Amino acid sequence: MMTKIVEILKKETKSLKTQYVEMTEKWAKKEFNRLLDSNCDGNAILVRGKYYPKNNSLKQSETAKINLLNLGKDIFLKKSVDSAKEHYENSILKLADRISKKGLNIDKLKVETSHIGVNIETTLTDGKKTVNAFTIIASGEIQRPHYRYLIK
């Protein structure tokens, strides 16, 4: 039963996966270029317009950003895209589990999917029970695109 729901959801949400991966890749390119402004300068490191001494006084998050730059742009982009694909796969599995617990008759299942802006809504019904699953996608200038499924 779970496998069938996963197959249906993957088929119905191909556009979500494509859109989400593209958003993540676009963000990663901008983020890497933004982090590139965090240049080392002598005994200080410029991060977001502030200079930090090159010692252990850097915040852990600032050190992590500098480490991302050391990966290089190609590896950073690949890791970001791979992470987005993994998030998509995991969210489909979680969603399928939540839907299967609703007790729909898989043999009579009808599915309809629509886009609402960047978000997606999928309605699954067996004629007796109906489940609506929809995404909420959030992203920003420095916020990595992310989403979650909600069901009602």
Image: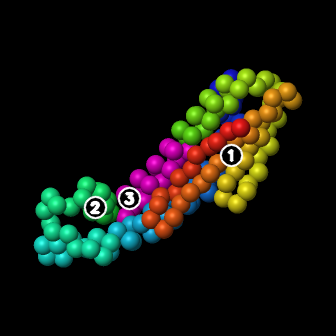
Q: Residues within 10 Å of mark 3 (few under 14, many from 20)?
A: some
Q: Secondary structure at mark 2?
A: helix
Q: Which mark is residue 76?
A: 3
Q: Which mark is residue 62?
A: 2
Residue 89 point in image, percent of width and height? 55, 40
Q: Which mark is residue 117?
A: none
Residue 40 at least partly seen:
no
Name the chief secondary structure element in magenta.
helix
Q: Residues within 10 Å of mark 2 (few under 14, many from 20)?
A: some
Residue name at image x 32 percent, y 72 percent:
48
Residue 50 point in image, percent of width and height? 27, 74
Q: Which residues are magenta?
A: 73-88
Q: CA distance from mark 2 to mark 3?
A: 16 Å
Residue highlighted by disc 1: 134
Residue name at image x 44 percent, y 55 percent:
80
**123 w.r.t. 106: above or below:** below
Q: Left of 9 or right of it: where is 89? A: left
**74 w.r.t. 38: above or below:** above
